[in-house]
Amino acid sequence: MSGLSIKLKTPHTGDYEQPTGLFINNEWVKGVDGKTFEVINPSDESVICSVHEATEKDVDLAVSAARKAFNGAWRKETPENRGRLLVKLADLFEKNIDILAAVESLDNGKAINMAKGDVGACAGCLRYYGGWADKIEGKVIDTAHDTFNYTKKEPIGVCGQIIPWNFPLLMWAWKIGPAIAAGNTVVLKTAEQTPLSALVACNLIKEAGFPPGVINVLSGFGKVAGAAISSHMDIDKVAFTGSTVVGRQIMKAAAGSNLKKVTLELGGKSPNIVFDDADIDNAISWVNFGIYFNHGQCCCAGSRVYVQEGIYDKFIEKFKARAAKNAVGDPFHNETFQGPQVSQLQFDRIMSYIEEGKKAGAKIETGGKRIGDKGFFIEPTIFSNVTEDMKIVQEEIFGPVCSISKFKTKEEAIAIGNNTTYGLAAAVHTSNLNTAIEVSNALRAGTVWVNTYNTLHWQLPFGGYKESGIGRELGEAALDNYTQVKTVSIRLGDALF
Ligand code: NAD
């Protein structure tokens, strides 16, 4: 691996060998154009290392490898063996949890215990889809006595997958699991901010025994490698997670090239609605987790908090105290809940939203400032005195910042909850079953949590209504986005004429 790996160190695991190449055909290679880029540690702004950058030519090579695998032995691989490989990969994730989590914390800045949770969820997701591989079935459909019809669910082919930096490993597993279970091959591009953990995981692909070309992983930039994937003439489907702006570009590129299938998991501005009859302490802890988990860098973050007027004053006092107690700091400390934001760019975006909120007349109840002068740390922030038209209430901030306001009636809660172009998630906190079901039914969101928040599970479909996306990830539903239906109709009788 000369020139394609580097010795690094994490505070939790000590020395380890960090791959830095592109992973094509189960081999580590340099980019054709010989470019590299630096990876920054968000905790102290230092350069961790440089990795090889994929350009269009590398995307072409990865797509050729994936096509060759798809047209070759992989297409004939039994569903049972596809499942076995995914289960083996899940086992290897669990065996390597310490190093995977430590690299994730180093590169992304997420708290080590949260990173371990992510690795556990990766294993759960990969094993779950391993279980699905031999249960993807068609139907027999009776149309006439002399005709035999059946449907098959076939893989789509070569899938391009573009993932973001907020859950680098988890998004890797969410994308690879259903694609591979259904028999596709994959060219996955990681986010330029966080390539490292995925590269460590690529060694596990080889160790699990996946044939060459089935899973290819590239580090690179969106405008170069990402654009090459979404406009590629030999990629059959593109799956993307990230901003709504880029989601639109990906659809356009797909439309302008070979009309590849598109699934998108985009942004959100999710309402977290607390009724007077909720268990207030329980609600506060979920509202706190809803916005500050992963430093607010969640597409489903509960960034708009609405509290019914009867408990509003008490709620805000307790919520302020709870938010101010969140442990923000070094991701490698065991008690840390919130680490740094992922990059200077994200840090600047969030700080400018905080300034924007102040200028618009919103009141900071707690937080609002940078912590320290090294690393991208921001205080957990709550804005009150907001109006629905403010930017901080309408736009995705993607940081530890929420707005809180009052509502009177159930009808009002539903109307303000739906007052967004997004529709990824929502939550209702109440002890009244009718309220829970009525409001859940009325909210236009792909996931509605009741008396909880951010409790995603690989068995449960996840995806957006409205401008939050197209298609579903996780659960059985994701398999529909990685298969296409073939109808075979067999005439049993004589010729018609
Ligand atoms: P982004 O959408 O630009 O990046 C996400 C991924 O898309 C990365 O892999 C990137 O390289 C790639 N990409 C970028 N431009 C591309 C293009 N033209 N063609 C193909 N791929 C491209 O997100 P960002 O700039 O890192 O973050 C901006 C905002 O996006 C955040 O503030 C947040 O609001 C949102 N975001 C959402 C999610 C999510 O989980 N839905 C994740 C990350 C960011």
Image: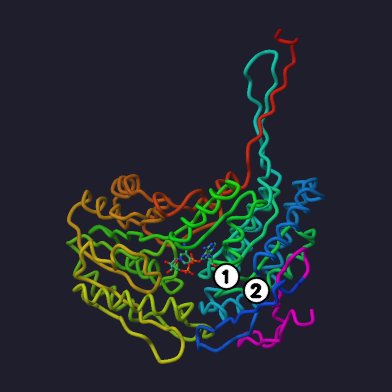
Of residues 333 and 387, the one nearer the viewer is 387
The image quarter in which residue 380 lies: bottom left
* Viewer-closest of 359 and 363: 359
262 vs 207: above or below: above
Classed neighbour count for the residue bearing mark 2: other residues with Cα under 10 Å, few (<14), some (14–19), many (≥20): many
Rendering quarter of residue 23? bottom right
- Which mark is drawn over residue 221? 1
Report the residue marked by disc 2: 53
Q: Which residues are magenta?
A: 1-27
Q: Residue at x 28, y 54 (%)?
A: 419
Say which residue appears at 36% left-offset and 70% top-offset.
288
Q: Is residue 19 magenta?
A: yes
As shown in the figure, which amino acid type bears the numbered disc 1?
Phe
Answer whether labels 2 and 1 touch (C-beta < 8 Å). Answer: yes
Say whether mark 1 is within 8 Å of ligand 1: yes
Q: Quadrant of residue 390?
A: bottom left
**Residue 441 in magenta?**
no
At numbered mark 2, what does the secondary structure look like: helix, strand or loop? loop
Query: Does 442 sit above or below residue 397?
Result: above
Q: Secondary structure at mark 1?
A: loop
Residue 264 image position (x, y, % from top left) = 50, 54
